Image (cartoon, helix red, strand yellow):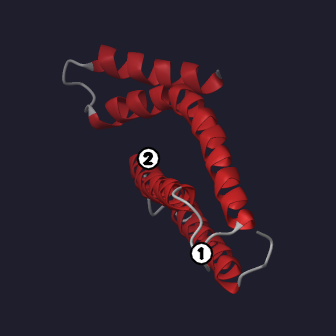
Amino acid sequence: YESGDPSTVLFFVITQIIQLLIAWLIGFLIVNDFSEYIDDTLYYGVIVAIGTTFYLLVYRQNLIVLAQLKRGPVINRYSVLKIYQIRENITIFRVITSIAQRLIFACMPPFIFYPIYKLVPPNIGYDGLRLVSVSMYDCLLTM
């Protein structure tokens, strides 16, 4: 449970390095005007999709391991500490999922309205749609 396995430490170090590199890249692109807001929205969408995929894979793997451990003790594989850790992991995943669902519900509308404003060209007869979209975007961000 708290053995400090080198693979666990390595996983967290690599994860932090990747997150820092992505943050520095996005910061560099924004500061130097290499990207527009629609690009940023796409970057964040891709990052969220990748993160969600890894989250679901790890959650599923924890469920599989828990099911294997519940089948019964097998010599050299069963560990009280391991089953406790897996149960704690699954509990944390469920709490994070509950929080994430509410957060997605609250944050999704701005990401729907902003692309409408940026992708619909001005002066082609849809200015009302553009203005309502940007107004809803601003309104929802302030909430």
Circle 2 residue: 41
Q: Quadrant of the N terminus?
A: bottom right
| Residue type indicated by callout 2 | Thr
Q: Residue at x 55, y 56 (%)?
A: 66
Q: Residue at x 64, y 23 (%)?
A: 142
Instruction: Judge whether 111 appears above or below 29 on screen.
Output: above
Q: Give the SS element for disc 2.
A: helix
Q: Residue 87, labelled with which disc? A: none
| Residue type indicated by callout 1 | Arg
Q: Residue 77, labelled with which disc? A: 1
Tell me which corner region of the image, top left, top right, bottom left or bottom right, holds residue 97. top right
Looking at the picture, tell me which residue is in the foreground, 42 or 60. Answer: 60
Looking at the picture, tell me which residue is in the foreground, 53 or 115. Answer: 53
**Within 10 Å of the Cα at label 1, are there few (<14), some (14-19), or many (20+) other Cα atoms?**
few
Nearest to viewer (mark 1 / mark 2): 1
Q: How many marks?
A: 2
View extreme (bottom): residue: 6
Q: Quadrant of the C terminus?
A: top right
Q: Residue at x 48, y 19 (%)?
A: 135
